[in-house]
Image (cartoon, helix red, strand yellow):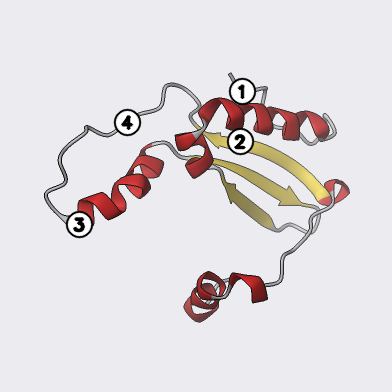
Amino acid sequence: MNKLGNRLFMMIFPNFTKLEQINTSDIKSAQVIGSTGEIKSLDFMVPVSNAYSIFYARMSMIKNPLEIQLTLNDGRKIDLDASRDYTYHSKETIQRLNQFMTDLDISVRKTEPLH
């Protein structure tokens, strides 16, 4: 999804977008990028503008970046963003990421289990 028009189409009509399935045998390496320490929260303020209230969740995800970077055998790199899940449900997200990483072959994993 490199073109802006394709991205807009995907956001407006998600049911028409083609999903790509990745087999675990196609993954050359996988690593978790980001911090899984204490979640950095934003100061609670009475929103003085609608813009602040609209972007509050996005700003919180920016302060707590977390993604899984997959490198495939054909050289493509795919970044799977887990920031939103981690921001709202940190314990469950860490459990799921650990399960995903342990399901992969040990030679593929580039990250130790998360805490």
- How many angstroms separate mark 2 from mark 3 (CA)? 34 Å
Residue where numbered disc 3 is placed: 50
Asked if the residue under mark 1 is in contact with the one under mark 3, i.e. CB atoms within 8 Å, the reply is no
Residue at 74% in and 35% down: 100
Residue 110 x %, y %: 70, 32
| Residue farthest along the right direction in this orientation | 25
Query: Dot 3 surroundings within 10 Å: few (below 14), some, or many (20 or more)?
Result: few
Q: Which mark is residue 32?
A: 2
| Amino acid type at image mark 4 | Ser
Secondary structure category for the residue under label 1: loop
The first of marks 3 and 1 along the sequence is: 3
Asked if the residue under mark 1 is in contact with the one under mark 2, i.e. CB atoms within 8 Å, the reply is yes
Q: Quadrant of residue 39?
A: top left
In the rendered image, the quadrant that contains the N terminus is: bottom right
Q: Nearer the viewer, mark 3 or mark 1?
A: 3
Query: Dot 2 surroundings within 10 Å: few (below 14), some, or many (20 or more)?
Result: many
Residue where numbered disc 4 is placed: 41
In the rendered image, the quadrant that contains the C terminus is: top right
The first of marks 2 and 3 along the sequence is: 2
Q: Is residue 87 left or right of residue 68?
A: left
